[in-house]
Image: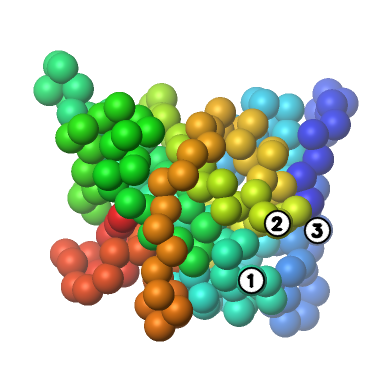
Amino acid sequence: MLDSRPREAGSPDARLATVPGPVDPRAPADPTDLDPAVRRVLDAAARRGVRFEIHRLADTTHTAADAARALGVEQAQIVKSLVFVAPRGDGGLELIICLAAGTNRVNVALLAAVTGEARIRRATAREARELTGFSIGGIPPLGHPRPVRVVMDPDLGRYPEIWAAAGHDRSVFPVSPAALRALTNATVAEIAEIPPPDARAGAPAMHADAPGPSPSGLATPGT
């Protein structure tokens, strides 16, 4: 669980322990065997004076429902980090990440109103990779190489603990909604519409929630 207490010099930036025997998704991962992308997330949190545990799932989870089952939590406790972009005056793109509850879909019209960006759109898979520095499927809420605006779904605040991607498609971390908001400097606003019950089971996990085929399938950030 997240620990925001000051750390002594030389102390590790994550409280992790070796996982003995079969992989337990609720057991912390081995700190000596972390993917470099995961380490970037931990380092970003450490710069804010925060430590948290990384948990490694046995398999890649393609949907929020899959992740919830693997962790033994409710689907709404899974944080989807969805990548959007808005055009800048210099021809570039501004990166905007929406942190949505695993049962919700982002309403682009609401997001445009919240951000003041009428031309905001879903990022392509290539844009998401280039702008965040992380591969689709494991895009985290923090640790990005460039400034990012973050908008957070208030439904995530319904739980004392939620789970977000940690930079790798099998790595996640638990955090409180308040801590996640502080870590990402997120704006909490109504941006989501709740899909009908029969659509929830197919909502992709921490990286997307757009239905149907796309150039990279479930690994494309969505609305």
Its colouring scheme is rainbow
Q: Quadrant of residue 210?
A: bottom left
* Residue at 77% over, 80% down: 21
Q: Amino acid at mark 3?
A: Ala
Q: Which is more N-terminal, label 1 or label 3? A: 3
**Helix or strand or loop: what does disc 1 sit on?**
loop
- Looking at the picture, tell me which residue is in the foreground, 115 or 82: 115
The residue identified by callout 1 is 74
The residue type indicated by label 2 comes to: Tyr
In front: mark 3 or mark 1? 1
- Label 2, residues with CA under 10 Å away: few <14, some 14-19, many ≥20: few
Query: Observer-nearest residue: 147 or 121?
Result: 121
The tag earlier along the polypeptide, 3 or 2, is 3
| Residue 78 pos. (x, y %) | 57, 62
Q: Is the residue under label 1 in contact with that under label 3 (CB below 8 Å)?
A: no
Seen as rendered, the residue at the extreme top is: 90
Specify the quadrant that holds the C terminus. bottom left
Which residue is identified by label 3? 17
**Residue 169 in sight in this render:** no
Residue drawn at 61 percent across, 36 percent down: 181
Q: Is residue 204 above or below residue 199?
A: above
Return the residue at label 2. Answer: 159
Q: Are marks 1 and 2 in contact (CB under 8 Å)?
A: yes
Q: CA distance from mark 3 to mark 1?
A: 25 Å
At x 40% / y 41%, what residue is drawn? Answer: 97
Camera-side residue of 172 and 205: 205
Three-letter code, disc 1:
Glu
Mark 3 or 2: the one toward you: 2
| Mark 1 closeness class: few <14, some 14–19, many ≥20 residues within 10 Å | some
